[in-house]
Image (cartoon, rainbow, N blue to C red):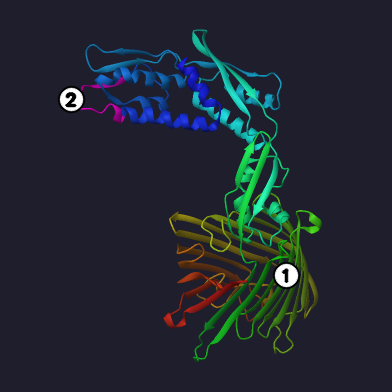
Amino acid sequence: MNTITTIQSCIHAPMQLRIHAIILAFFVFVAPIYAFDTTDTTEVTLYFTRPLPAQIESVLDEIVVDEQVDALKPIIRSYLTQFGYFTPAFQRSEHDDTLFITPGDRAVVRNIDLKPEQFPQRAMIQRQAHTFIGEPFSQPEIELWITGVLEAFERDGRPFAEIRLDSIQVTPENELPGVDLFFSFSETDEVTLFAVIIEGNKETRDRIIYRRAGVFPGDRFSRERIDNVRPRLLRTGLFRSVAEPELQIDRRGGTLLLRVEESRFNSFDGIVGYVPTDDGDGFFTGMAHIVMRNLFGTMRRVEFRWQRETELTQELFFSYREPYVAGFPVSLAGSFNQRQQDTTYIQTRSRLNSATDVFRQFTVGISYEYESVIPSADVAVQRVFESSSNLLGIDLIYDTRDDLYAPRSGMVYTTEYQTGKLNRQTVNGNVTETLRRFAIDAELFVSPARQQVIKVGVHGREVQLDDYQISDLFRFGGTRTIRGYSEGQFAGSRIAWSNLEYRFMTAQRSYIFGFFDTGYYYVPSVDQQQHELESFEYGYGVGLQVETAIGLISIGFGFGKDDTFSTGKIHVGVINEF
């Protein structure tokens, strides 16, 4: 009777099962060690007359004291019963201090019966239950199965479904005991969220928050979906903080309360760098970056960026993104990018991109890009020829970061593949060839201790062509790739870099950091002046990011492979939200 009561109380709900497990662990592990630890007593050894499964014997193979043997017997009996040993026998040796335990035959599961005869998913549950037939009885495994079934019903919008153990029968069969289990299933109707209440949004429209949170009034209850509301909203970058959702639910339905604190949606990012030269004059580099992330409270995004890398090299970028085209969960973005590479050429790119969320954190996109290169008419020797290309691409994004500005956990992974035709005007006439581009970026954030974060980043790019010219190569080096070098200092058809960064958090988005960056690039032979080259670089340094009233201020000081203190690079950045 005690055995039946114990099993039944564990199967009503997963929470009761966890409590039972904790209580059982206390009696099995703690009681033999502490409850019977007295002095001036005779020690007794437990001895099993037949081998038992290792998980049972390792727990019960303990030394106990003489006076508590009778009190220990019910505990051993209860534990053995959970694994199908229903008739254990105990015998105290008359000659020494040994307690012999004969567990008896282990019962096998003979039948599992489910009532009523008809209910949704009964066939599926019965198939799962059939896997226990003929196997040794194990209460923990059956409890785990029941927990999984109830969690599946909870994910399916039925959190009040119940499975009860009505009775258990142990009968001998072919000289081995068999166990018949009789369960009854109580199903409830699907629970609906009849209200989703949002508090704290002054600019962002409710329907946008519903979309990004993944819950709407009238949706079927889903525990998994509700658990993902907070990280989904934080990854939008629109909210400074998001409280854990508050759910009130009964058999009639549920109400979900979301409390948010909006960020400032517009930002200005400015960077100024100074590069010393051998003649002592030096020159400034810089970047201005303006982003409006939530136009009219609808997540429409406009971005503008101007960047000067050297005295003669600069870049201009503009983009617009519509998050929901005609109300569908599909975004459409367009961008324009123009780069003037010293006195060599001007490169222009126009791009259209459409993307949709396939899963909660996984986005798939397709793109079309037109690119043109116009050489400068002022150069004496032409190293770049006029060209144009049309490319189609696909990109994948997986993002689980808990914050866009100062993540403490999660990762972000992006990859893109583009292919198309390139037409180039050369001295030998018009040439057409296939152009392919690959890109991969992965960053991982882990917090090994309080207020400490380690960032690990791995990045790679490759372009494939039959014949290369300088405008085809990827450029990298500087603040966003390998620190300690000038912006765009290196170029190659195949490049890779890594970033290792240790951060000590002083506030939510403020930290001091040290970094070590590595980089690799391969330059193919592009003309008589540029021969094949392969090189490995590294940079290191320290810096800090501080959140102030005007925004985030970032200061870094980095050294390249051959730098001295006087040739190190200083980078200052400001992200001013308004």
Q: Secondary structure at mark 2?
A: loop
Q: Which residue is mark 2?
A: 40
Where on the picture, by quarter, is residue 305?
bottom right
Q: Is residue 252 above or below residue 527?
A: above
Residue closer to the observer: 507 or 196: 196
Residue shown at 41% from the left, 25% from the top: 56
Question: For residue 319, which numbered disc appears in the image?
Answer: 1
Whether residues under marks 1 and 2 lie with C-beta atoms below 8 angstroms apart, the answer is no
Instruction: Residue type at mark 1: give it.
Output: Ser
Q: Is residue 80 above or below residue 94?
A: below
Q: Is residue 58 magenta?
A: no
Left or right: residue 281 compared with residue 196: left
Residue closer to the observer: 492 or 216: 216
Where on the picture, by quarter, is residue 342?
bottom right
The numbered mark, 1 or 2, whose residue comes first in the sequence reads 2
Q: Secondary structure at mark 1?
A: strand
Left or right: residue 156 compared with residue 570: right
Q: Position of residue 491 (x, y in %)?
A: 61, 74
Q: Position of residue 107 (x, y in %)?
A: 49, 15
Q: Is residue 34 magenta?
A: yes
Q: Please indicate, yes or no, whether residue 477 appears anywhere in the rendered image.
A: no
Q: Please indicate, yes or no, whether residue 328 appears anywhere in the rendered image.
A: yes
In the image, the segment drawn in magenta is 33-46
Residue closer to the observer: 414 or 507: 507
Mark 2: give few (<14), some (14-19) or many (20+) Cα within 10 Å: few
Instruction: Residue type at mark 2: give it.
Output: Asp
Q: Is residue 85 above or below residue 568?
A: above
